[in-house]
Amino acid sequence: MSTTAIATFLLIAIFIVLIFLRVPIVYAIGIASLVDFFYLGINPMQMALKFVSNLNSYTLLAVPFFITMGELMSAGGVTDRLIDFSKELVGWVRGGAAMVNVVSSFFFGGISGSSSADCASLGPIEIKMMEEQGYDRPFSTALTMASSVEGILVPPSQNMVIYTLAAAGVTTVSIGQLFLAGYVPGAVLSVVLMIYSWYYSKKNNIPVTGRFSPKACAKSFIRAIWGLAAVLIVVVGVVAGIFTTTESAAVAVVWSMAVGLFIYKGFKFRDIPRIFNNVTMMLGKVLILIGVSGAFTYLLTYLKIPTMVTNALFSFTTNKIMILVLLNILMLILGCLIEMACLILMLTPVILPIWISLGLSPIHLGVVMVLNLGIGLLTPPVGSTLFIGSAISGISLERLSKAMIPFYLVMGIALLILTYFPQSFMWLPMMAY
C-alpha cells in the first residue's frame, strides 16, 4: 500500500474506532488527525496553525451572536407569545393543537436556530397542550421533535454559517442566499408535518376546538412581533446589504436584550450573567469543534480524499438520480452516528465537489445537508434532540424511536422534494440576488 492509502486508512479507522468507544467527538478528531500528522512526517505545529486559522474568521463571529440571541429570546418570554399567535392562526382547524406545535416551531426556529433549544423550550408546553386536546404522549413528543428540525432550516441558523465556512475551501457561498433558501424548505417540512397531523387527528377522532377570529389573531401577532423582529433584523439586514452577517447578529442581540428586559420583561439584569454562562458553555463546544476540524479538513485535502470519493462514486454510477440517492443515504447514516456541526465540517469538502460536478448549486447542498443531518438529531444512538424529547416527556428512547417511525417517513418525503426539485426553493434567493 502507498503512504497516502495507509494515511487515509489510519485517519478514518482511528476516528471510527474512537467514536464506537464513545470517545468525545472532539478528541476523536484530534487524536486521529495528530496520528496522521506524525505518520506523514508533517510538523505537528501545522495542526495548531490549522486550528487557529479555522477560528480566525470574521464570519464566524456571527455564531456566538446568534447563540446569544437565541438564549436571550428563550429567557425573555417569546415562547408564550409565539404559541398564542400560532393558536389563533391554526388552532381552530382539525388537528389544530398539533398544527400549533408545528407553526410555533417554525417561528421559534427563526429565533433559536437550534433543534435542541426548540424542543427543550417549547416541548413541555406543547406536549401538555396536545395531551389536553386528546393526543397521546408518544405522538405529541414525536411531533415536537420532528417540528424542531425547522429551527435549523429557518434563518438565522448557526449551522448554515458553519456550512459556509466549511465550503470556503471549495467555493464561495453567500450566507444571505443561504438564509433566504431556508425559508421555503422550512415551510415544506411544516406542510408535510401538518398534513400528517391532520390525517392522524381525523383517524383518531381528535375533536376540533375553537374558531378563527381575525381580531384575536391580529392582537396575538402584535404581541409576538417584538420577538419576530429580531429575525427580520438579521435576514432583511443581510439581504438588503445594510449589515454584514456578523453586524446584523450583533444588532439582533442588542434588540433581543431590550425586548427581554423592557417589553416582555422575561428576565432581569441579575439574570444576564446566567444567560451568558449558558452561551459560553454552548459556544465553547462549537468553537473547539470548528478548530479541531480545521486539521482534519486539511488532511482530507492533503490526502485528496474528496477526489478519491468522487472517482469511486462516478465509477459506480454516472446516473445523477442514483448519485443523489447515495449521497443522501451517506448523510443520513452518518447523521445517526456523529454530531451535526462536526459532520457539516467533515462532509462538506468531500460532497460539495461532487455536487457541483452534477451542475447543482452549493446553496442547494446546504439546505439538503442541514435537513439530512437534522433528521439524524432525531435518531438513535446519538441524536441529541431524541434524548431531550425523552427527558422532557419521560418516555423511554426505545418507545420514542418507534413513535418516530411515521415521522421519519414524512420527513423523508420533504427531503426527496428538496433534493430533486431544487427549483421549489431556489427561486427565492435567485430572485433576491
Image: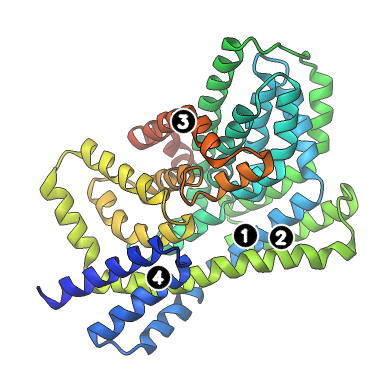
| Nearer-N-terminus badge (1/2) | 1
Residue hosting label 2: 251
Give the class, few, some or many, for how many residues have Cα within 10 Å of label 3's Cα (few <14, many ≥20).
few
- Mark 4 belongs to which amino acid? Ile
Residue hosting label 3: 405
Is the residue 208 above or below the residue 49 in the image? above
**How far apart, in angstroms, are the residues tagged by discs 1 and 2?**
9 Å
Confirm or deny contact between disc 1 and disc 2 (CB under 8 A): yes
Confirm or deny contact between disc 1 and disc 3 (CB under 8 A): no
Give the class, few, some or many, for how many residues have Cα within 10 Å of label 1's Cα (few <14, many ≥20).
some
**Total numbered badges shown on the rendered structure:** 4
Q: Nearer the viewer, residue 46 or 340?
A: 340
Q: Nearer the viewer, residue 2 or 183?
A: 2
Of circles 4 and 3, the one toward us is 3
Query: What numbered label is drawn on residue 243?
Result: 1
Of circles 1 and 3, the one toward us is 3
Of circles 2 and 3, the one toward us is 3
- Mark 3 belongs to which amino acid? Ile
**How far apart, in angstroms, are the residues tagged by discs 4 and 2?**
35 Å
Residue hosting label 4: 29
Q: Is residue 354 left or right of residue 126?
A: left
- Mark 1 belongs to which amino acid? Phe
| Nearer-N-terminus badge (2/3) | 2
